[in-house]
Amino acid sequence: METTDRLILSLLATDGRMSFTDLGKATGLSTSAVHQRVKRLESRGLIQGYAALVDHEQLGRPLTAFISITPIDASQPDDYPERLIDIPEIEACWSVAGEESYILKIRVATPRALEDLLGRVRSAANVSTRTTIVLSTPYENRPLG
């Protein structure tokens, strides 16, 4: 991948709403040349979408936690993401190596809501859980440098 494309990706990762004109100024390219490059990066799948970063505390879900899940019965099919897809508090699901099978990133309003969510996860997927509650987030969603 060209250095200019990497720069465009870095700039858009920092500010996904950056205009083609501003991208052109930052890269030394014309607006139309930047537009073509961005469209090419999108079509190649290097840019998979654009999203707004939201304040979860203001949305009423200030508690973030990571829930590691381990199957109770190892002979069950590995379809845990599908079993949990309809639980809206789950923001992300990662398949991992190690003792656990998956790690879930969740956001809820209160410790009581977390306790309720843990019960729903255990019931829906027939798993045991280990939970880590986030105390603070010094940074998140950092663009790659």
Image (cartoon, rainbow, N blue to C red):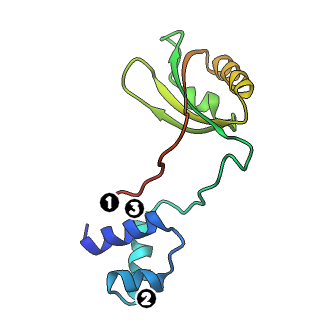
Q: Nearer the viewer, residue 5 or 66?
A: 66
Mark 1 / mark 2, whichever is N-terminal: 2
Q: Position of residue 13 (x, y in %)?
A: 44, 63
Q: Is residue 98 above or below residue 59?
A: above
Q: For residue 46, which numbered disc appears in the image? A: 3
Q: Nearer the viewer, mark 1 or mark 2?
A: 1
Q: Is residue 14 above or below residue 119?
A: below
Q: Position of residue 142 (x, y in %)?
A: 43, 54
Mark 3 / mark 2, whichever is N-terminal: 2
Which residue is painted at 53% across and 9% down in the image?
73
Mark 3 vs 1: CB contact within 8 A? no
Q: For residue 145, which numbered disc appears in the image? A: 1
Circle 1 — which element?
Answer: loop
Q: Nearer the viewer, residue 139 or 39?
A: 139
Q: For residue 31, which numbered disc appears in the image? A: 2
Can you name the residue that lies furthest to the left here? 2
Q: Position of residue 70 (x, y in %)?
A: 50, 17
Q: Nearer the viewer, residue 129 or 87?
A: 129
Q: CA distance from mark 3 to mark 1?
A: 15 Å
Circle 3 — which element?
Answer: loop
Question: Dividing the image into 4 quarters, which one contains the C terminus?
Answer: bottom left
Quarter of the image for residue 38 reads: bottom left
Badge 2: residue crowd in 10 Å (few <14, some 14–19, many ≥20):
some
Badge 1: residue crowd in 10 Å (few <14, some 14–19, many ≥20):
few
Q: Nearer the viewer, mark 3 or mark 2?
A: 2
Q: CA distance from mark 1 to mark 2?
A: 23 Å
Question: Dividing the image into 4 quarters, which one contains the N terminus?
Answer: bottom left
- Which amino acid is tagged 3? Leu
Q: Position of residue 24 (x, y in %)?
A: 39, 85
